[in-house]
Image (cartoon, rainbow, N blue to C red):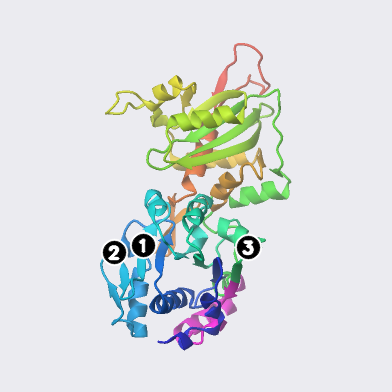
Amino acid sequence: MTEAQIPVAFRGLFEPHRFKVFYGGRGGAKSRSFAAALLIIGRTRTIRVLCAREIQNSIRDSVKRLLDDEISRCGFGDFYTSTDQEVRGLNGSLFLFAGLRTNPARIKSYEGLTHCWIEEAETISQKSLDLLIPTMRTEGSEIWMSFNPDRVNSPVWEIFVLGPPPPDSLICKVTWRDNPWFPEVLRKEMEHCKATDPDKYAHVWEGEPVLISSGSYYGKILQAAEDAGRIGIVPVEPQLLVNTAWDLGMADSTAIWFFQHLPVGHTGEWRFIDYYEASGEGLAHYAKVLSDKGYSYGIHTAPHDIAVRELGSGKSRIDTAKGLGINFKACPQQAIPDGIEAVRQVLAASWLDREKCKQGLQCLWGYQREWDDVYGRFKDKPRHDWTSHGADAMRYAAVGFRRPVDLSGAPRKARTAYDMWGQ
């Protein structure tokens, strides 16, 4: 294989651009063309490439096998050496592999990167993008992204396709039509899909995103809120306290929803006014976040295991938080499906601030069931990825927040009785 054998639609990969984003349907030769183009460029000059995904638990999750295949297909075996963890060229070109969410410290430590290729960029979180982009600081460095669109609310879709994209971005949609080597077996599959399921055909083969992913837990409810005008600007009600619900990570992200609750009717009205998420920080950092936001706080809800004492210090995180001025109430332990149903009921009675809760909303839109490749169907459990933290924090709000009511549902002014949402 030579450069001339890369489809014409991908010739822009050889032009200088800060961002190169190629998206579309199945059979468009995106991954193969990206791999071949980088290998060709790596022969002409010394480059240092980070091949990244959102999650990479092992080298098998990476595109290394694809690069090895292209080295063989292109006849580059005399130039590139492939080891267990990297690919090296005779001129010093180097291909490295890492997960953006699974190896954030490693990502920050990379120096001299000239290229980053994000495969399956559809799954990349906003936080990972915010981590990666400043890391690519070498003069003339480029960020390449390839993906098949899934949903319209993913960060990559919103930033680069809906746009306007960042300066010096090359955005290209490619489909099976752009692949001169589109195999006959896929053509037959594509034509059958087109004849029997036009909507699926548009999504899978033409690269059109779906409004709501078929495995989404909250997509339909969020779309109903959008249609009803309940996602937009949500002002803070000065007479109400601001409550928080937390998903507390240890070596992972911590997510916080900020909300006010109006105790009217059966479920009340929920107003989600803010959201915050970070990783690698201690409780003191989040105590400062609460202080800097300047809200008057009510109840802080945390996961049920916050009271468990750590072996090293003998103190629990609930004790540590109390010393920082955060008085947590532990959420009762409840089965995840029940908690998801509680969130559905909360979202049906919620207003959400589009800008201040943007990252949290992306988590809720993207939160979905795990796919079973063996049986070709969704499992009865959530997929654990970057959306999980915001979704879990929302679940703790729905299950753990206690609101004052009397038997008629009206607020009581003194000696408040509490009911437990979802109990």
Residue 394 visible in rendering: yes
Say if the magenta span includes residue 177: yes
Q: Which numbered disc covers residue 85?
A: 2
**Distance from the alpha carbon under mark 3 to that under mark 1:** 27 Å
Q: Mark 3 = which residue? A: 167
34 or 411: which is nearer to us? 34
Q: Are marks 2 and 1 in contact (CB under 8 Å)?
A: yes
Dot 3: element: loop
Q: Position of residue 194 (x, y in %)?
A: 58, 78
The span shown in magenta is 172-199
Q: What is the C-alpha distance between the residues marked 2 and 3? A: 34 Å
Q: Is residue 129 left or right of residue 210?
A: left
Q: Earlier in the sequence, mark 2 or mark 3?
A: 2
Q: Which residue is mark 1?
A: 97
Query: Which type of secondary structure does the marked residue at label 1 adopt?
Result: strand
Q: Amino acid at mark 3?
A: Pro
Amino acid residing under circle 2: Gln
- SS class, disc 2: loop
Which circle's residue, 2 or 1, is located before the other in the chain? 2
- Is residue 330 magenta-colored? no
Q: Position of residue 53 (x, y in %)?
A: 43, 60
In-front residue for pair 60/406: 60
Near-viewer residue (197 or 255): 255
